[in-house]
Image (cartoon, rainbow, N blue to C red):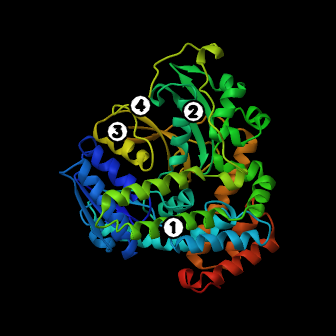
């Protein structure tokens, strides 16, 4: 079977193909097609990815192409991870918002809105081509803002799209590590929207332990997501918030940290990416792939260490894992996941899904899918981020019996913003776009929304066309 990666000139392509090659038999895959419209990045990162993959698995076929039609032709699965406008546009998204003392993060608020304006039309074109050329491929959308983009694609009839974010699965893996158990031995519940979700349940052997965990200071200090937030907030919520809720719960701190930083997150990532590309060229990575991979890994290590460091004002130091016996919980299976456990890292969610369906193996994964009655108070076709049961029959969303009213109000507010944003893009309407941003909690102003919409539409005219 064939898997296509659209946006294969990105820095994570090497990790992606490495995992496919390592677990090809387990996943039933033998063909990878890597596509990107940027010829230089495709050659460098694509070539390194191909070399690395074939070193791991001599039988895997890896092809590079700048044609979306060629890439998805006959594909069984398609992974899309694109950044329309590149790092430069991301920086503009941030700075236009920051000039008005607003957070311009790439997936939420003003920055996420602008990113969606550029991205959704391109994604719709890609989905049309995939429908025409592929083998009825299942599409995994990694493209941000993932929830909003997936909602737009579903609205236009592309129900074969699953929105994927590695944030929730990384949270589960970190949580498991923090208590020295394998993630296959814990059962968690996550609900909400992409980058706006809460983990409100953790069970070991059927026993709920989240309350004891969040009452433990050492646990909260050790877990990246929980360490970002005030402990009183977490204990009040009785849940662990997704890291991106930091922008809502500690908005003034995030804004101040960004404003006083030397660089925005976009500028920091652009700097690392440019230095990495320059170093890879100097190393002649295409013809000297061993050295190229060494250079690549050193820069990726630097990049991963900077995640959320600007917004939170610094990076977190890892503490010792919590001893479950100290919490009155009998310790269970210890150790790190082996090949029989879940896939981790970038694209691990997609691979877990593929394996579960292929081998009729029951797994529970947080995905961005149609609600279908999972979260009360939302429409069935609203895309939510929720724990799903995956097996040979596909997806079944878990049911969330009740949602705290304050969480539900926030979910509904952002979902309304998403629907208005999609409507604005469909009609190229500034008025509807202003309504969308006006109700977003990170903007919450008609006058600011009007300024933002007018400037974003003008600055990105080459991408979004003329709006009325």
- Mark 1 or mark 2, earlier in chain: 2
Disc 1: which residue: 275
Q: Are marks 3 and 2 in contact (CB under 8 Å)?
A: no
Real-space Cα distance between discs 4 and 1?
Answer: 34 Å
In the image, residue 26 sits, relative to residue 89, either above or below, namely: above
Q: Which residue is mark 4?
A: 337
225 with respect to 100 (left or right): left
Instruction: Please tell me which residue is depicted at 28% across the width and 37% down the height of the picture.
Output: 359
Q: Earlier in the sequence, mark 2 or mark 4?
A: 2
Q: Is residue 21 visible?
A: yes
Report, in whole angstroms, how far the alpha carbon at label 1 lies from the one at label 2. 33 Å
Label 3, label 4: how far apart the Cα atoms are: 17 Å
Cα distance between the residues tagged 3 and 2: 22 Å
Quarter of the image with the C terminus in it = bottom right
What secondary structure is marked by label 3? helix
- Badge 1 element: helix
Say which mark, if any, is on residue 175.
2
């Amino acid at each position: 079977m064939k898997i296509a990666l659209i946006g294969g000139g990105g820095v994570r392509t090497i990790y992606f193909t490495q995992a496919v090659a390592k677990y090809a038999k387990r996943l039933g895959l033998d063909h990878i097609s890597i596509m990107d419209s940027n010829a230089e990045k495709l050659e460098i990162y694509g070539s390194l990815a191909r070399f690395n993959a074939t070193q791991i698995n001599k039988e895997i076929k890896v092809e590079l192409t700048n044609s979306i039609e060629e890439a998805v032709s006959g594909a069984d699965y398609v992974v899309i991870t694109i950044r329309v406008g590149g790092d430069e546009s991301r920086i503009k998204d941030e700075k236009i918002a920051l000039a008005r003392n607003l957070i311009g993060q790439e997936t939420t608020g003003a920055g996420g809105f602008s990113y969606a304006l550029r991205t959704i039309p391109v994604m719709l074109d890609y989905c049309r081509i995939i429908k025409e050329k592929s083998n009825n491929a299942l599409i995994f959308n990694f493209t941000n803002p993932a929830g909003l983009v997936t909602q737009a694609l579903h609205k236009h009839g592309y129900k074969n799209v699953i929105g994927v974010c590695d944030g929730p699965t990384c949270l589960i893996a970190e949580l498991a590590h923090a208590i020295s158990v394998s993630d296959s031995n814990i059962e968690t519940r996550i609900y909400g929207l992409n980058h706006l979700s809460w983990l409100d349940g953790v069970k070991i052997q059927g026993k709920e332990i989240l309350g004891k965990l969040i009452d433990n200071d050492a646990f909260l200090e050790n877990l990246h997501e929980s360490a970002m937030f005030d402990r009183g907030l977490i204990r009040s919520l009785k849940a662990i918030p997704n890291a991106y809720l930091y922008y809502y719960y500690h908005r003034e701190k995030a804004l101040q940290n960004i404003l006083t930083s030397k660089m925005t997150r976009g500028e920091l990532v652009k700097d690392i990416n440019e230095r990495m590309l320059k170093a890879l060229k100097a190393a002649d990575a295409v013809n000297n792939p061993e050295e190229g991979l060494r250079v690549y890994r050193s820069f990726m290590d630097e990049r991963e260490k900077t995640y959320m460091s600007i917004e939170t004002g610094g990076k977190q130091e890892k503490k010792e894992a919590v001893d479950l016996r100290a919490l009155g919980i009998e310790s269970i299976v210890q150790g790190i996941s082996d090949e029989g456990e879940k896939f981790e890292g970038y694209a691990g969610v997609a691979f877990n899904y593929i394996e579960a369906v292929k081998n009729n193996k029951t797994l529970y994964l947080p995905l961005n899918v149609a609600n279908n009655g999972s979260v009360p108070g939302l429409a069935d076709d609203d895309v939510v981020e929720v724990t799903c049961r995956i097996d040979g029959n596909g997806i079944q969303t878990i049911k969330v019996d009740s949602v705290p009213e304050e969480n539900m109000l926030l979910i509904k507010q952002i979902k309304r913003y998403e629907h208005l944003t999609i409507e604005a893009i469909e009609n190229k309407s500034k008025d509807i776009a202003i309504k969308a941003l006006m109700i977003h909690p990170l903007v919450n102003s008609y006058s600011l929304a009007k300024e933002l919409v007018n400037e974003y539409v003008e600055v990105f005219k080459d991408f979004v066309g003329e709006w009325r």
